[in-house]
Amino acid sequence: MIIRNNAVSQNLTFQIAVAVDVPPANVQVDHNLIDGYRGYEDEVYGEDYVEGDPLFEDPASRNFHLHHPDLAIALSHPPLRIARHTFSGVSGKSRRRAPTA
C-alpha cells in the first residue's frame, strides 16, 4: 500500500495510521502534508512529509481546495503538473452541493 501526496488535516483521532502488525515492506508513506499530528499509537509521519496548515479555501463550507496549491505541488512525488480541472472535475469552477434539509 502506498499513502502519498495527501493533505490530511485535523482529523479527530489521527492523521495517518499504520497498524503495528502491518509489515513495513507492505506499506510506504511519503510526501504528505500533515496538519494536527497527535502522536497516537500507530500514527506515522512517513518520509519526506511537511507539517503545517494546508490553507484550505473554506473548510467550514466544505471547500477543501488548496488556497496556495504551489506548496503541495512543489512537494509532491513525482512532481505534479497543475491540473486543468479542479477536484470537482469542472474546469475553473467548483460544483455546488445541493442544500440538505
Image: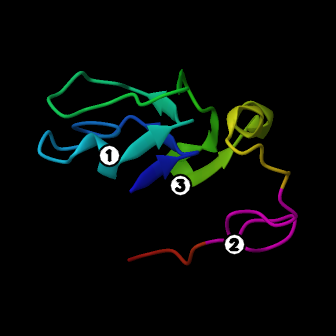
Provide the residue designation for mark 2: 95
Q: Find the magenta span and give its range.
A: 83-96
- Asked if residue 46 is positioned above or below residue 25 in the image, the reply reads above
Q: Is residue 53 left or right of residue 3?
A: right
Q: For mark 3, does the 10 Å Cα neighbourhood hold few (<14), some (14 to 19), or many (20 or more) residues?
A: few
Write the residue at 65% across / 71% down: 96
Kindly indicate the quadrant of the structure image that contains residue 72.
top right
Relative depth, front residue between 14 and 63: 14
Q: Distance between the residues labelled 1 and 2?
A: 39 Å
Q: Which of 35 and 56 is in front in this view?
A: 35
- Residue drawn at (73%, 66%), measured in percent from left and top? 94
- Circle 1 sits in a helix, a strand or a loop, which is it? helix
Kindly indicate whether the residue at mark 2 contacts the one at mark 3 (C-beta within 8 angstroms). Answer: no
Residue 20 pos. (x, y %): 14, 39
Q: How far apart are marks 3 and 2 (CA)?
A: 11 Å
Residue at 34 percent across and 24 percent down: it is 37
Quarter occupied by residue 77: top right
> Residue at label 1?
25
